[in-house]
Image (tube, coloured by chain):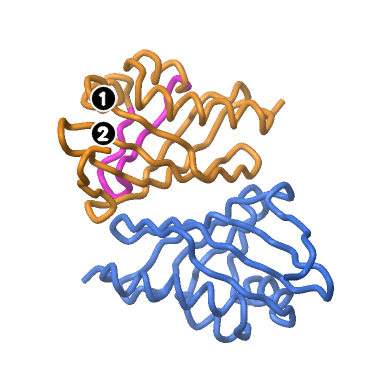
Chain colours: A orange, B blue
Amino acid sequence: MAASRDAIRTTVENYVKAVATGTVDDVLTLYAAGATVEDPVGTPVRTTEDEIREFYKVVEPLTQTAGVITLKIAENNAAFVFRLVTHLGEQDLVMEVVDVMTFDDDAKITSMRAFWSQEDMQSVPAS
Amino acid sequence: MAASRDAIRTTVENYVKAVATGTVDDVLTLYAAGATVEDPVGTPVRTTEDEIREFYKVVEPLTQTAGVITLKIAENNAAFVFRLVTHLGEQDLVMEVVDVMTFDDDAKITSMRAFWSQEDMQSVPAS
């Protein structure tokens, strides 16, 4: 049976929370085996768990806050806007990204593609 | 040469405008030959110009207003949130959708996928 909308919504919320404040393991547990990650879209697709771990390892030590702004679900697909703020001392790095994900029947992520570019990052004085 | 960000941005803005207030021809002129449309995601992909015309023909006679809320561009891909209001007498039908598009070198749309479901439509008193 396909994942319910509520289950997909929960995975998306847990994902954004895990990226901001969790460990690599917290993120990886939301992914299905064999999942792929393309972030940002246009860069090589990460297809192995090692490659995906390496990717999230970079953000793990950062002090971040994040939240989902808009989430649309269509069958076993989701597209959502989220805002990620990285706290770098006296500066905050603010990013808004659109992520597109597919899910398996257990609402585990089977693919993630992130739409953003340098232009979507803004450095502002820490609030 | 790949389409510039500005050219992609213009196509997206013209697309949303054309869907809301233009003709089927206004929409179709933004698409490349051989383009595909999946709206909403999870339904059969429209792969011929006739199928795509038929799709936009349904919204052509409606009185609508629309605007782009958030647009992210990554290489020749865009993901954007837009808001479409259909004016039905004393009621407005308000929809927020995330569209994902790919573009050719002339910033013509080569594919469109729309993420939304019934839950994203709201009927409110006309303002």
Q: Quadrant of residue A9?
A: top right
Q: Position of residue B125 (x, y in %)?
A: 79, 64
Say which chain tag 1 marks: A
Report helix, strand or loop for mark 2. Answer: strand
| Count of marks, rendered view | 2
Q: Which residues are magenta?
A: A32-47
Q: Nearer the viewer, residue B18 or B124?
A: B124
Q: Earlier in the sequence, mark 1 or mark 2?
A: 1
In this rendering, is residue A42 above or below A107? Answer: below
Report helix, strand or loop for mark 1. Answer: loop
Q: Position of residue B73 (x, y in %)?
A: 34, 58
Q: Nearer the viewer, residue B46 or B59?
A: B59
Residue A46 is one of the magenta-drawn residues:
yes
In this rendering, is residue A43 above or below B98? Answer: above
Q: Position of residue B13 (x, y in %)?
A: 45, 73
Q: Residue at x 27, y 19 (%)?
A: A50
Q: Residue at x 45, y 23 (%)?
A: A31
Residue A14 is one of the magenta-drawn residues:
no
Q: Quadrant of the N terminus of chain B?
A: bottom left
Label 1 is placed on what type of residue? Thr
Label 2 is placed on what type of residue? Thr
Residues at circles 1 and 2 in contact by the CB criterion of under 8 Å: yes
Say which chain tag 2 marks: A
Q: Which residue is mark 2?
A: A86
Q: Nearer the viewer, residue A76 or B121?
A: B121
Q: Which residue is mark 1?
A: A63
Q: Quadrant of the C terminus of chain B?
A: bottom right
Is A83 situated left or right of A69 in this image? left
Q: Quadrant of residue A7?
A: top right
Q: Residue at x 36, y 49 (%)?
A: A115
